[in-house]
Image (cartoon, rainbow, N blue to C red):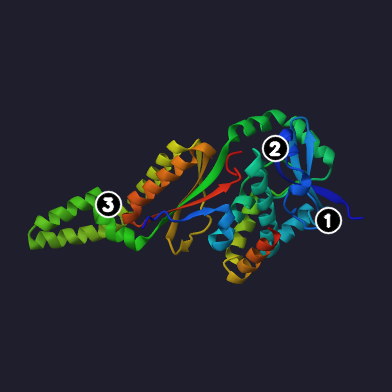
Amino acid sequence: MTEIAYYVYCIAESAAAAELPADSLPAAIEEDAKLEWISAGALAALVSPVSRETYSEESLVEHLTDATWTAIRAMRHETVLEFVAKQATTIPLRFGTIYLERSGIEQMLSEKSGELKKIIEQLRGREEWGVNIYIDRAALLSSITTVSPILREMVQHAEQASPGQSYLLQKKIEALKSDEARAAVNRIVDQIEEKLREQGDDVRRLRILKVETTEHGELKAKFAFLVKRLGFERFRNEAERLAQEHQAAGVRLELTGPWPVYNFC
Amino acid sequence: MSTFDQVITTDEWENTDISLLETLDHVLNRGLVIAGEITISVADIDLIFIGLNVLLSSVETAQEVLRKRHEIL
C-alpha cells in the first residue's frame, strides 16, 4: 500500500464542519481520494489523503513546474474552499500544506486554537472581493488635458496666447502629458482604494506579477477587500459609481469574487 | 453603458480568460501559511507561478485546464 500524507485545505469551526458531511463535499485534490474533517476541540481541518511519494517536497516542486498538473490541482483546491466558504466561516490555507500524520493536524489545531479562533471571528460574515483597475492608455492620454489641473490651465493659456506663445505652450503640454497621465493614474487608484475601503473592513494592495494587457487596457492595480456580506450591495454600488466617475479617463474596474478570504488571514 | 459591466462571480469563471490566472494567483500565492511537514515555501511558489503565468498564456493549455475544471464541478 502506498504510504499516505494529509493535504490540508482549510480550517473551520467543528460545529460548522458537522453540517458539511464529507459525502456532500466536492472532489478532492487527487480524484481517487475523499475529503474528511479532522477535529480537535472547537476547530476542524478539512483534509484528504495524498500519496507521500507524489507530495514529498522534492516531488511536489517537480510537479509544480508542470502547468497543467498544477492548474488542475489549484482549481480543485479552490473548488473545495469555495464550497465550504459558502456555508461556513473558513480559514483558507495555502496550496501545499501537508501533514504526514493525523496527530500532527490535531496537535496544530489545539496549539494554535487561540490564534485560529481569533481569525475566524475577524472573518465571520465577510467575504473577499477583488478589484482590478485597468487603464486604456490611449483614452487616458486623450482625456488627460481635462483630467490634469495643470494641463487644463496650460491649455486655457494656450488658447488665449499669441500664436508664438501658443506654439511653445503646446510643446510643453505634449511633454507634460505622459508625466501627468502617470500622476493621474496614481491619484485615481488611490481614490478608488480609499473610497472602497470605507465600504469594507480591510484592504490589501496585491502585487501585479506581470504587466497584463487585456481588452480592457493595462492592469494598473489589484486590490482585495474584506467586505461584510450584508454590506456588499453598498460596496458594489460605490464601485459602480467610481467606475462611472473615471470612465472618461480610460479607467475600467473589474470586480471578482466572492473569494475565500485568502488575503486576510 | 457603464464601464462596470464586468462583475465576475466565481460561478462564471469558466467563461473568462482571466479567471484561471486569477484563481492560480490566489490559490498558489495566498492563504494562511501553517507549517506542515512539507509546506512549499512562499518564495518557491512565487517563482513557479511566474513560470506558470507564461506557460498558461498558451491558449491550448488554458482551455484544456478549463475543460477539466468543468468536468470536476
Q: CA distance from mark 3 to mark 2?
A: 48 Å
The mark lying in front, picked from 3 and 2, is 2
Q: Secondary structure at mark 1?
A: loop
Horizontal side, residue A181 vs residue B22: left or right: left
The answer to whether tags 1 and 2 share a subunit is yes
Chain at tag 1: A
* Badge number at residue A12: 2
Name the residue type under label 1: Glu
Q: Residue at x 67, y 30 (%)?
A: A117
Name the residue type under label 3: Val
Residue lying farthest right?
A1
The answer to whether tags 3 and 2 share a subunit is yes
Horizontal side, residue A1 vs residue A156: left or right: right
The mark lying in front, picked from 1 and 3, is 3
Q: CA distance from mark 1 to mark 3?
A: 59 Å
Q: Position of residue A62 (x, y in %)?
A: 73, 60
Q: Nearer the viewer, residue A242 or A95?
A: A242
* Badge number at residue A53: 1
Q: Position of residue A248 (x, y in %)?
A: 31, 55
* Residue B32 visible here: no
Name the residue type under label 2: Ala
The mark lying in front, picked from 1 and 2, is 2
Q: Secondary structure at mark 3?
A: helix
Compare marks 1 and 3 and give the one earlier in the sequence: 1
* Badge number at residue A147: 3
Q: Which image quarter is the N terminus of chain B in? A: bottom left
How crowded pointer 1 is (Cα within 10 Å; few <14, some 14-19, many 20+) is rated as some
